[in-house]
Image (tube, rainbow, N blue to C red):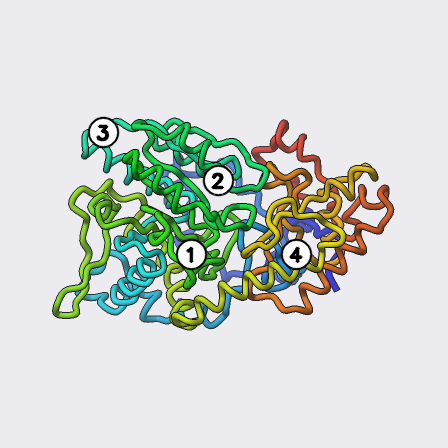
Amino acid sequence: MRNTQAVQLLSELSHRGRRAESFPPADVPTRPLSELIPQKHLASAPPQLPEVTEPDVVRHYTNLSTLNMSVDTHFYPLGSCTMKYNPKRHERLAKLPGIVDVHPYQRPANMQGLLAILYEMQEMLAEIAGLPAVSMQPAAGAQGELTALLVAAAYFRDKGETRTKVVFPASAHGTNPASAAIAGFDCVQLPATANGLIDLDALRKVVDQNTAVFMVTNPNTLGLFEPDIAAAAKILHEAGGLVYIDGANMNAIMGITRPGDFGGDMMHYNVHKTFTGPHGAGGPGAGPIAVRDFLGDYLPGPIIKKSDADTYDLATPAKSIGRVRTHFGNVGILLRGYFYLRTLGAQGVRDAAEQAILNANYLKALLADVLTVPQGQHCLHEFVASASSVLKARGISAMEIAKRLLDFGFHAPTVYFPLVVPEALMMEPTETESKETLDAFAATIKTILGEDAAFLREAPHTLPISRPSDVKAAREPVLKWTPCLRD
């Protein structure tokens, strides 16, 4: 049973003189401290740290842990973010002494085993993408897409071309325009369409000799595969531009089709989303990029090269944009992705994508009689339902469903994204969930939709904190905290 009681802060448990550890008397000279350490380095008062016993500390953090929601404890249908279960065997393998004890400043000759693993990962990422050149340096998907745009900018500078525009659909991830702006490009957004897909006529109107890159997520944020992606790529290529595939949703197509085969020139992976790994709280992550061969010289280094003698070395591409992160990237997550791919094998990668598609369509069908999905008769790994028609007359919103789900032990789906769907509920069950879990989740949503509107507006009812003010948090942020310790 979940803990529904508020957990006291350690500062609230503090009493002067209580200790979790008892140390023997100091054996240093008994002269005044000011004679041992210069006065300027001494604090005027002891740090305001809680004074608590060991049981206080253990119970505090144990009780906090029971409030957590995670993929290990709850179903997490968070659309777009792909919160799937992380196999524990990959955690164990990534912690093997021969891996975690390697220092990045060691000579390549002394870490051939790790470089061999990372080289194989590099090659597998190239094969799944259908793009031959890979850099594993970027630390997250957002940094990966920024890195790809910096590569594109370097490519056009090298050609002596001044291209200023990056184009993207209205349903794009918010990081796409942000990355384009940071890379120095002007952002051009295509209008939303009724079917949620690329409008080729609208694309033709904005693409010209100033267009550098078209950024598109495929499958897109509505969980739909773009059927005109090859035609869109042709429009860009005829104008001399490049096509960037946001790889956030690669878990739906890996092993089935490849971005390089349907017109992509660059892409990033979210290794933690597509190939599993710890996810959330700002990291850790890994966002390697794959590009066509003519862009390979601009990749950030180092990349890993294999010699004819089966030895591995680090190399920096000839026209590299420079490092975007230290060393080879976030090795811990890259290793988890590597072990995941080696566990599945080529057929298993495809099977995982097909299972993700099956689960999403099954959940969509279970909810079809209560929630409409405006775009797409069938989806891939996720779908975006609209709660507008069933909630508007009752004066409640998608947020009420999201909050109430917490009472039943389910994490809420993504709400209000993408903005092109009113009262959006974006659901991604992932391939790791069972039929029984999906049945229970769908039944719970139907139960919630039948509950009293006033009751729903106060949800959640079983958690220590119910409805914090989002507006107040944004307008009056508390940027520091001062403990009030008891005597």
How far is mark 3 from mark 4, CA to CA?
Answer: 47 Å
The amino acid sitting under disc 2 is Ile
Q: Secondary structure at mark 1?
A: helix
| Of callouts 1 and 4, the N-terminal one | 1
- Residue 382 lies, in percent from the top left, at 57, 53
| Of callouts 1 and 3, the N-terminal one | 3
Which residue is label 2 attached to? Answer: 198
Visible residue check, residue 90: yes
Q: Secondary structure at mark 4?
A: helix
Q: Secondary structure at mark 2?
A: loop
Which residue is label 3 attached to? Answer: 161
| Of callouts 2 and 4, the N-terminal one | 2
Q: Indicate which label's residue lies in the foreground, 2 or 1.
A: 2
Badge 1 density bin: few <14, some 14–19, many ≥20, Cα 10 Å: many
User: Which image quarter is the C terminus in?
Assistant: top right
Badge 4 density bin: few <14, some 14–19, many ≥20, Cα 10 Å: many
Q: Residue at x 26, y 46 (%)?
A: 300
